[in-house]
Amino acid sequence: MRTNELLNTFLKKRIYVFLFIILAVFFVLLTRISYLQLVLGKSFYEDSQLVIHQTVNIPASRGEVYDRNYIMARKYPLISNKIRKTLIAIPAHFEVGELFICVEQLELLFELEYGTLLRKIEKSSTHSYKKIELILNMTNGQVERFADYYLLFSKFILHKEIWRFYNEQSNVAHVTGYIGLPSAKDIQQGAQGDVLVGKNGLELIYNETLSGEDGEILQLKIQNDSSGQVQLKSVKSGKSLILTIDILLQRAVVKAMQNYQGAVVVLRPKTGEILSLVSTPSYNPNLLLTRNKKKRGEHLRYMNKVEAELNRAIATKFPPASSFKTLVALAALEEGLIDFNKKSVCKGKFILKSQYSGFDDAVFYDWDVHGAMTLKNAIAYSCSSYFYNLGYQIGSEVIIKYARYFHLDQKMGIDLPGEITGVIPSNLWKEKVIGQRWYDGDTINLSIGQGFLETTLLSMTNFYSAIINNGVAYKPHLVKEIYRMGTSDIFLDTIKKEVLYAIPLEKKNLNFIKEALMKTVTDGTAKWPFRRYALKNIAGKTGTVQTKSNNRLDNESQHAWFIGFGPTDKEKFYNIVVGIFIEWGRAGSVPASIAAQIFQHWDIRLKEKSVYLD
Amino acid sequence: MNFKNIDWLLVVSIITLNIFGIFVLYGAGELGHIFAYQTCMRMFFGIGVLFIFYTIDYHRLVSLAPIIYIVAIFLLILILLPFFGTKIKGARSWFRFAGFGFQPAELIKIAIVLLLTNFLVSKNLSVKSVKELLFPSIIVFIPISLIMVQPDLGYALFLIPLSLLLLFIGGANIILFVTIFFIGFLTIFIPLYIEYHKYMLIEPLLVLLQDTSIRLYEAVKVLGFDLWSILELHSDKLVFKTSLANNQWVIKTLLQEENYEIISKSVEVVRSQKPTFLRDFFYKPWLVFGTVLFFVFGYITTLLVAFFFRENNKTYFIRYTCLILSLGLTLGYLGSIFIDLRPHQVSRVVSFVNPEQFSKGAGYQLRHSLITLGSGQFFGKGFTKGDMTKGDVAFLPEWYNDFIFSTLGEQFGFVGTGFILLIYLFVLLRSIFIALHAKDDVGSLLAIGIVSIFFLHVFLNVAIISGLMPVTGLPLPFLSHGGSNLLISYLCIGILLNINRQRFINVAS
């Protein structure tokens, strides 16, 4: 090839080297391509013919539920999804006598005692199509061993199912609720017939959040190489819930409540988070989902008998009794109708003069004769006759007004189903419901929280948290975070606190009430239970409800309340409000001792710094 | 315009390539019809560009090289700004203005070729000392680092062999060349090696964390490879990257004192479970520093020995080994600190070294590319009969762009691929012919630069799709569906034609 002589000879030499490189590289490329297309071409062609376009529906897994410590990288799952592998045999798939031999061999394989599996197939006829569950809950080791000898046992069916497990058994049943088969109404609303839906508790309220969305993938399969998958609709697995519940506290509360029938609510006044919510007697959601029909039936009968499904913290209402006196005192102070130092002498009873001549005067008894009382002592020692006087003096309107301020007749908006409202009686209400006008006696009853007044435990507890918060109460809630783990991202929704009501109250009045409530614990009605645990800086109020039988000697006929908060020497950040209600209890000292146990647990947790607060 | 001196053979062959590309695109499903139509339009536009550059004197282009280079660099900087650059497939490499998209990385190729030509000719085609190589290293290093930031690994790595090839042909000393080559190799190899091992640690780390703390496990799972950048940045208490800001909770989780301790300990545990000498070496900065010092000392000693005892030849080998190791280690180590590779880039390297580990991500692309290419066999499945590119969702990702050669192989078989490779070879040989017959050294060198561009594109692309190299995105000139690449390719051919044309003008005058 003739080239330009003017060019640098060195350059030309290098260009020839480059030319050689190009030829070499193209030789390599052509060799590689021909190797791929001509030598391996046939197998690649077969691969490309085996390509499958297949649309597969992927069911979304239901979200799990954790307690608040999840954020601290400690895991306490309240509800988790477990995978259960069951070994099933269908007798009709086997030849005569074959099943017996196979099951015998299975026993040998799994090193079981002779007869453990054989017993299960004894009754079935040889041509039955009925499934026999040979081994429920196979362990991983068993599955591996089974897989090793799969050819021998290929007629057995290994069934895999996802199964919801309530790790805390009955401890948090009223919070989490349970799932079950959808009702006709659920199906109308779009639930799939075979997918379990929430039936109660958070499972019901957050059903949509938890259940997620099914996905669809387009499988691009090449032989058994399932690597090629294109998502048409990505599976949105159910979002998980991180609750405000502190499971260690919850367990402590359950332990303290084990012998009583009633409810406990532990609130954080600063945010409205519910740290613990217990209603006894409780039920076990796992037993409701079990396949063992006998056990399930037994449990259902038990639940009906003791009304276990009833959430006594939000779905029952009772007169708040003495725990209402705090509100009466606060109302009187706020309206300026009473002085801090006003004294009155308690004679153990209050006589309401009859307005009509010829009728007997109505006598309202106190539970004790207290003697001379200030307002503070009247709260601390729960002097009813003092409050009869006070109530009669300030009138029912003021009490009703303040009870309404504190939403005692409204729903708190907790994220649980079945919340009911309390009842605040008034003239109008009485005429409408009972058909009688409002008597002064009703005012007297109202002033000690008895009579027609009925409240739920939650609303009373929230009233006490408003006392700590200077008149502000937050909406009580159970869910702290809603989150979903994606493959590369995370969905996180933090539930923010919401103000339920904010009432401008005077600080000195609130401080006075707080002091009075502290005195209740140090010297007053709740003195002994707390002294036993050497707890200081707790404030609270007991309450004892006389039921209609009104037999004073029969403690069993009384309901008892205790609502308290603390530790008062620490910042509001660390405070909790504990509301306890016990049906057929033994006066206010029983819930007070339960409260003392709860406060002691909280005290230890704060010292250990093992509780996550933010 | 004088059409007499056009090298019609070259023009016809590249138009054949382009039309063949349009057929391949059209034959691959409905999406392909649209792409084929677009490429058709672009072809006419490209031919126009070709004739414009045919008329422009290449000497003027070479003398304008610094300005072209600065404009290209300016554009590269501009697209890094969120307002101008558009993010496509995770990389901010597109410049979009009034409906037209442009990729400045394409422009920088030809700008570097022009500037290097300018430089080498001014040095009279002999580069003998390290000092003289400083300028070309800088002009290549700036765009590489800018493209790395986008990040577009394919183009960044493309510029290195391109400039090396041009320097080699343009008269660089062969020993100097080997030195530069090895230093460059170490500079790239060390960061990739370190990142590779970081990647391999994630999985055992997950296994470890799964039992101890679930929240951290999920945080690491979400972050994946990004974990390292958070851990490393945290040690300096720096502000986090914006791309990670979406996962604020992850950062919140990781930065809790307790959790940070757990994860640091777990990383130590995982590292000690699988000790690797070279990896552990790079985790000890003082050891790296000491080794570098040792080699620098060795270099100086040999230099002194050579100076005082006049034994240049005997110490030659030791001296250059010391130089390569000290500079390569330093640059590589600095690179591993400052270059921040994205997870998908590292996973490609990992999947090439370790294909079993990644059958889903990058390994999936390669496997499907091989099936697509190979299944064509000798005669191919026929025009519009490809199985792998059909449907709404094609089996082969990027079949129209980086993997078009596989698509071609499926439809037209070895007949098609061989034919196309031969046309490419013909184009390259014809261009070398032009280089050898150019009027002067400038034209010859410029032609060689353009040949290098095409050669590297074809070589790297075909090597990647046939599994000879790790997967990085590079288009195939004239075949791929990419406007910027097509435009610059026609432009390059236009310059080649002008070099060819001036030969006749010279003879005539």
Image (cartoon, coloured by chain):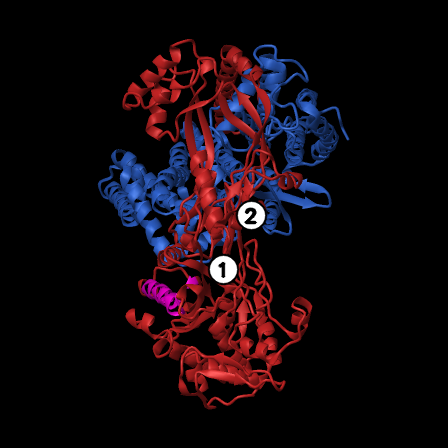
Chain colours: A red, B blue
Of residues A364 and B49, the one nearer the viewer is A364
Determine whether, in the image, residue B385 is placed left or right of residue A280. right
Residue located 74% across and 33% down the image: B45
Q: Of the residues under marks 1 and 2, which one precedes in the sequence?
A: 2
Q: Which residue is mark 1?
A: A313
Crowd around label 1: few <14 · some 14–19 · many ≥20 (10 Å): many
- Residue A311, relative to residue B298: is it above or below? below
**Which residue ends up furthest to the top in the rendered image?**
A96
Q: Is residue A408 above or below residue B247?
A: below
Whether residue B340 is visible = no
The residue indicated by pointer 2 is A204
Residue sitting at the far front: A358
Residue range highlighted in magenta: A584-605
Quarter assignment of residue A534: bottom left
- Residue A587 part of the magenta-drawn span: yes
Magenta stretch: includes residue B372: no
| Three-letter code, disc 1 | Ala
Marks 1 and 2 sit apart, C-alpha to C-alpha, by 18 Å
List x then y, in percent, for residue B380.
61, 13
Tell which residue pokes out farthest to the left in this image. Answer: B309
